[in-house]
Amino acid sequence: MSATFTKDDIAGLSADQQKAILEALFLAVGIDREVDPEERMRFREAAEAIPWELDQAVIRATLEGARDRVQNTTDQEAFLSWIRAIAESLPGQELRIKLIRMMASLAMIGDLDRNERGLLNAFLLEFKFPDGVVQELKAEFGRP
């Protein structure tokens, strides 16, 4: 299964669901509050490859909002609530698997730090994948 979103994946999603995907991808590079040039470039490439049905102004506003929210959130429960809201908004296991794969590929640019590891684990938990899927994804990510 590919980690790339297709036009068919995006076509059935509401604007809020598309924004949730964009926020999740931003979290994968921004959770540690340090986005280096390579992460910025890879994020931009990944985000631009998705055939969004959103105006560029909406995409920019969503990214600015996600950046501000990350910068201003210090409470772990607030992050978990945000992750939970994103997870609950996204339908279907296949879409969620594509998203977690894209997030992992972005988070693993360079060293995977504690915040990035925690983010991926929180999404794996909130996506409510069966244990076999979780183990398969963790093995894909090079983690036990």
Image (cartoon, rainbow, N blue to C red):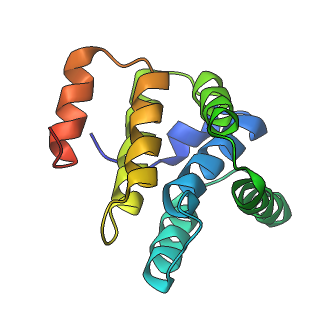
Rendered view: 56 above or below 25:
below
Quarter in which the N terminus is drawn: top left
Q: Residue at x 57, y 53 (%)?
A: 27
Q: Quadrant of residue 94?
A: top left
Q: Residue at x 69, y 42 (%)?
A: 75
Quarter in which the C terminus is drawn: top left
Judge from the rendering whether residue 23 lies leftward or rightward of residue 123; answer left or right: right
Judge from the rendering whether residue 117 lies leftward or rightward of residue 95; answer left or right: left
- Tell which of 71 and 43 is nearer to you: 71
- Tell which of 20 and 78 is nearer to you: 78
Return the x and y of residue 41 as percentages of the image width and height. 49, 79
Instruction: Name the residue furthest bottom.
Output: 37
- Tell which of 131 and 102 is nearer to you: 131
Judge from the rendering whether residue 65 lies leftward or rightward of residue 89; answer left or right: right
Rendered view: 90 above or below 50:
above
Q: Residue at x 38, y 34 (%)?
A: 97
